[in-house]
Amino acid sequence: MASRHDGDRVVALSLQLSQAHEELLRQLRGIRAGLGTRRLDDDVLLTHCLAFCTALTAHHEGEDEGMFAELVRVRPDLDPTVDKLVEDHGLISSLLSRVGELADRAAESYGPDLRAIGGELDGLAAIMESHFGYEERAISRALDGGVPEEGWSDRVFRFAAE
């Protein structure tokens, strides 16, 4: 049986989820804003893109392998919702691959692909905002309702910052 402290920790998970999403969006906005001002000769763009891609990938893998698995175990009725969220993660992963490819090219050519990266990042931001909003609405109540946290939260909430 969970203690009151455990319940407080679980309620905090939905807030942490929202904060993690906001941090990822902040990192993405920073990269997007810096496209026109950063010099590529020191691979700053590539470094920041790779750090962001790594952080977002780690967050989604932590959700898929930890939080979502636990949610479905405790709340089987959330299986269709979780399936949709995992599908979104696949789409986002494809976009991250494209951003990585464009960043590599831009670093090699010192700039011609910056507009293409900007366009991809704009699309990625729109999808992430929609995905994060849906995820928070769909599962926050379940998280606040008492989903056991058995070590999966670090991968979801503690990722490398830019």
Image (cartoon, rainbow, N blue to C red):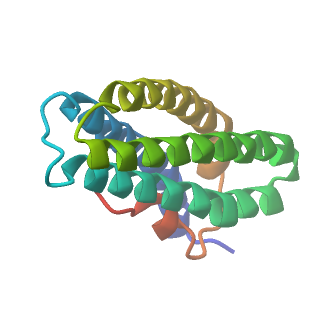
Say whether residue 79 is visible.
Answer: yes
In the foreground, 31 or 38: 38
Instruction: Identify which residue is drawn at 23% across, 32% down.
Output: 35
Residue 5 position within the rendered picture, expressed as x and y whole percent measured from the top left: 48, 68
Say whether residue 162 is visible.
Answer: no
Residue 134, image quadrant: top right
**Is 69 left or right of 98, judged from the image as shown?**
right
Instruction: Identify which residue is drawn at 73% across, 56% down.
Output: 71
In the foreground, 159 or 93: 93
Residue 157 position within the rendered picture, expressed as x and y whole percent measured from the top left: 44, 59
Residue 121 position within the rendered picture, expressed as x and y whole percent measured from the top left: 42, 31
**Is 123 left or right of 61, judged from the image as shown?**
left
**Is 88 left or right of 37, judged from the image as shown?**
right
146 above or below 2? above
In the foreground, 7 or 30: 30
Instruction: Identify which residue is drawn at 34% across, 57% down.
Output: 51
Residue 75 position within the rendered picture, expressed as x and y whole percent measured from the top left: 81, 53
Residue 112, image quadrant: top left
